Amino acid sequence: MAELRPPGPQGDGRDSPAAGTGPRDRSEQAEDLRREDAESDWSAGSWSDYGSRDKPGTALGRTVPDGNVLFPDIFHTNHLLFYDRFSAYQDYILGDCKASEVKQFIAEYLEKVLEPSGWQAIWRTNVFEVLVGVVDVNFPALKAVVQLSEPFLCESQDSSFTLECMQELLELKEHQILLQELWVVYDESGEFDQTALAIEHVRFLYQYIWRTWDEEEEDEFDYFVRCVEPRLRLHYDILEHRVPSGLVVDYQNLLSQCEELYEKFLNVRNSISSNDSDSEAENVSMVEGLKLYDKVEHLKQRLKVIENPLLRYVFGYQKYGSLQAKGARSTGAKVIHVVPLTMTANLLQLLTRDKLCPESCEALEVQFHHDPLAAVNACYEGERVIICPGHYFVDGVFSIADSVELEGYGLPDDVVIEKQGKGDHFFDCTGANIKISNLKLVQHGAVEGILYVHHGKTTLENCVLQCETTGITVRTSAELLMKNSDLYGAKGAGVEIYPGSACTLLHNGIHHCKEGILVKSFLDEDYEAPRITMVNNVIHNNEGYGVVLVRPGMPSEMKDAPAQGIKGCTQPTEVGDETACAEGSRQEQPGCVTDELELYKRTEASEQTENNSEIASVLGATTAKKRQIHRKRLSELGFTEADDNLMSQEMFVSVEGNQFKWNGKGSFGIFFF
């Protein structure tokens, strides 16, 4: 792990113990360094001693530059972990500086750790790479004074960059090159480790953290807190695939737009500043500048939302607004898509009998595919995909915008589709009528849930879902029918039900998730209440509640609710406890074993009925509260009699025959916010 030496107890957060030690006084400083280390609160194993001047040899790796020219190896520094960079910027480089002081603080840091001369580097631009030697450093300008190395080594996109051309270019630049454009040549002695790391930190800061408008946003927070930390966390969240790919694209597009508009704004502002006349053209420029300023501020706020990990998923982006259905084929024909792992004559005969020609084979077109994702992507409206037994590995997202049917030929355990590699959702459904049946879906290393219903109706029948993050999400205006299926393993909720959606759960198992079923707030005036039907489901072994309602709390409710905002009903007595009681009874009354078991069964059935009734009652009461709020708003607007159709749009709740067992916090809970 590449990391700078921590400061001593009296340090100001930006001084390195190795700072200021040159080649001649390293031996004299060695004992002092060891003494400071012993007095420091940092343990010897908590940091890496890169660039330590009292230890021979380098602690950094090396890498071979790409290209056809035989450049010397360079230090490998772009592998630093989040904490390496976080600690360097916070403790050594930036400290508590303001945005306007960033360049000054960097220069002070570089003066303490950078070797001013005697090292080589590869100067890289978008059009060429050339080997140079550093003879001095202009710290205030963050530039190195360089000269071409001998022999002359240069690689470019064309042959125009000759030795003479490069010499002329350097003379135009007064032989001064930005430090972030230099990659330090590898040296085994360890003498230039700190130099390579320092330049890497500067390069990363200006490439991924710094924005051209940062200096104009002075506030009470220091630059590290306001800008560096959130942008650094976002960068590593993206690297580690913790941010949806659609959101990453949105962020990059917003950043490019903002930079382009800000440059235009600066040009307009500069043109106004340089012109003292009060002409009509200047007035037009001022209006144009104000419009550009508003657009830039709007884009900056959107960027900040995405950089904030708490807000990026709530307000960040609408990923599926542009997903369009193909519609029916122009020829009017409908195709059956078959996905066999291996096709045999016997399998083809069975498919023909059971699926392809149950009634008539006239004008039937069949297409064969090697993987399920390719088959789904080839579908048009009303077509069907039949997946033969096998274990399929898919690297991608099933984005289904048409009404298609995806069916496994066999039992779910025989037809397995496993997501390979990290990514977003597994299945995204926006079609009017989608059906998925007889499949086992396995998700690994995911950022988002296993199945997302954005619009339309999705039917899930006789499926097994092995989740990774959340399970199934039913968004506003979408509908899910899930029956005879098994869902488990979600680190969030097994099923998330949004306001304005419809969710029917029949004869399913939902277990070993963070929460079983999560019903989101539907008191907000912008959304209609959801319609929920839960019949004969077994919801068990979830870490939290079997069913949890998340909604805004009224003042009286917040006063009575516990501090954490949760209240709920407890689990019925577990089987193990009942068995223990029955054992005690058997010892005293051996003839009553049957009666005890019957009593237990009746008690358990009664408690499960009470759980179902309570869930239905609470959800019904909440929709009644929404109706009261709605009536009050109508009355304030002058409508004394509400329209029956308008007021009938309340939550339909049917909760019957469900079993809740061994859920960590209970069968049902409410989270107020």
Image (spheres, rainbow, N blue to C red):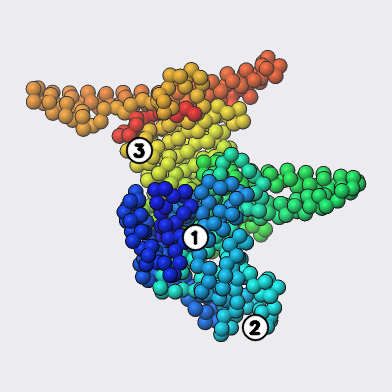
Which secondary structure, mark 3? Answer: loop
The residue at which mark 1 appears reads as 112
The residue at which mark 2 appears reads as 163
Residue at (49, 42) in percent of width and height: 473
Distance of label 3 from label 1 (alpha carbons): 55 Å
Q: Number of numbered discs present? A: 3
Quarter of the image where one finds residue 290: top right
The vertical placement of 341 against 456, above or below, is: below
In x, y percent, where is residue 494? 42, 41
Q: Amino acid at mark 3?
A: Asn
Q: Counting residues from the N terminus, which is met first, the one under dot 3 or under dot 2?
A: 2
Q: Amino acid at mark 1?
A: Lys
Q: Quadrant of the N terminus?
A: bottom left
The vertical placement of 102 against 509, above or below, is: below
Q: Is residue 279 left or right of residue 274?
A: right
Q: Label 2 crowding class (10 Å Cα cut-off): few <14, some 14-19, many 20+?
A: some
